[in-house]
Image (cartoon, coloured by chain):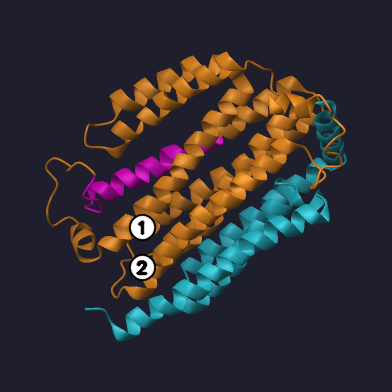
Amino acid sequence: MADSAVHDIPSVYEPSLFGTYSKKIGMWLFLLSDSLTFGALLYAYSYGRISTAGWPTPFHSESIVNATIMTAFLLTSSLTMVLAVRASVDRNAKAQTLWLLATMLCGTGFIVLHGREWTKLIAEGLTLSMFPAVPGQDAASEFANVSKGVPQFASTFFTLTGMHMLHVTLGVIYLGVVALRRKFIPVLLVLWLAAWLLTPAYSPFHYGAHVLLIAAVVISIILWLKPKIYDSSDVEVAGLYWHFVDLVWMFIFPLVYLMSARI
Amino acid sequence: MDSTQVALAERAAEQQRHHSKSLFFYVWGALLLMTAIEVYLTYQNMQPLKMLTILMGLSLIKAALIIGYFMHLKYEVSRMKWLTMCSVVACLILMTIFFFPDARRILELGVK
């Protein structure tokens, strides 16, 4: 009610404090708060590293190459995202959709590579007590002692990278809604079923896949309550979120992977 | 959106139209190049503190490029630039002041 009263008098709050529209300011405020969340996680990781003797350096050359390709995927997705924003302000709907889909593809590539990296580390014994036990796992596997001797490493590593992977997943879903709207819901449900059925029961991704189901329900409710065609301002705001996800990885990659490399 | 919001969104779109697309490709190239340098340094087995300093320096430059050009903050009004960046940097500095000396103290004195 109060909201409609404000919007009926457009000149009351002019000029805007930050010289831009409210959605963008809202997203910036969210990103500032989220940067503190990631800041806290990065500080927790660094604190653990400084204060713990014998901090492991588990990342072989193969992991470094994998993480470098993941970084390239994210950087390229940022480029395709700005091109999507540019297409949206030029009112080129087809190019906008194509660039958004390209961004989603790069983001999905990042998630798949990251999932492969997690699966490999868990199979080698680097795990959390909350993860289900891997059947037939060798007690003398490479990282079994790391998980027991320096549990802070696995805790901070999985929390930090898991939080980032969740953000990338939600970013891909966000862009999917902006690009395809209702058509994205069946795609999301197929992805959920595929992720749930194709991952083994002991994998964290088996139950993590339910994030996609929850997202499909939330999106259905939002699009049912407020169906709309997303304009250039929506694409720009979605782009801000996507670039932020890329930005955070620029600190996780050197701090977690490159500083813990065993070459 | 009401008419004020539409006008502000259109102004933001107009600013975007003035940027050359090639600028984004240059920024992307610079980001990839700096990533390649970081990975190269990893294979040089440098002293950890020196390597951390260089990596964090490069990460800050990459962050500035992403925020400035991709997130478009360079073209926003100065009030927005200063308020957003100063607030988050101040919080991170506070975390640094509190956490890192304590982490070193634990390492040097030990906790039993």
Q: Quadrant of the C terminus of chain A?
A: bottom left
> Magenta segment: does it hold A259?
no
User: Which residue in the protein does label 2 denote?
Assistant: A48
Answer above or below: position of A255 versus A73.
below
Task: Determine the chain carrying the residue at label 1.
Answer: A
> Disc 2 residue type?
Gly
Q: Quadrant of the N terminus of chain A?
A: top right
Q: Do callouts 1 and 2 mark residues in contact (Cβ within 8 Å)?
A: yes
**Left-right relation of A65 to B60:** left
User: Which residue in the protein does label 1 denote?
Assistant: A156
- Dot 1: what SS? helix
Q: Which residues are magenta?
A: A106-130
Q: Residue furthest bottom?
A: B109
> Disc 1 residue type?
Thr
> Magenta segment: does it hold A109?
yes
Which residue: 64% across, 47% down? A29
Q: How would you rate the neighbour count of disc 1 (Cα within 10 Å): few for under 14, some for 14-19, many for 20 or more?
A: many
Which of the chains is orange?
A
Q: How would you rate the neighbour count of disc 2 (Cα within 10 Å): few for under 14, some for 14-19, many for 20 or more?
A: many
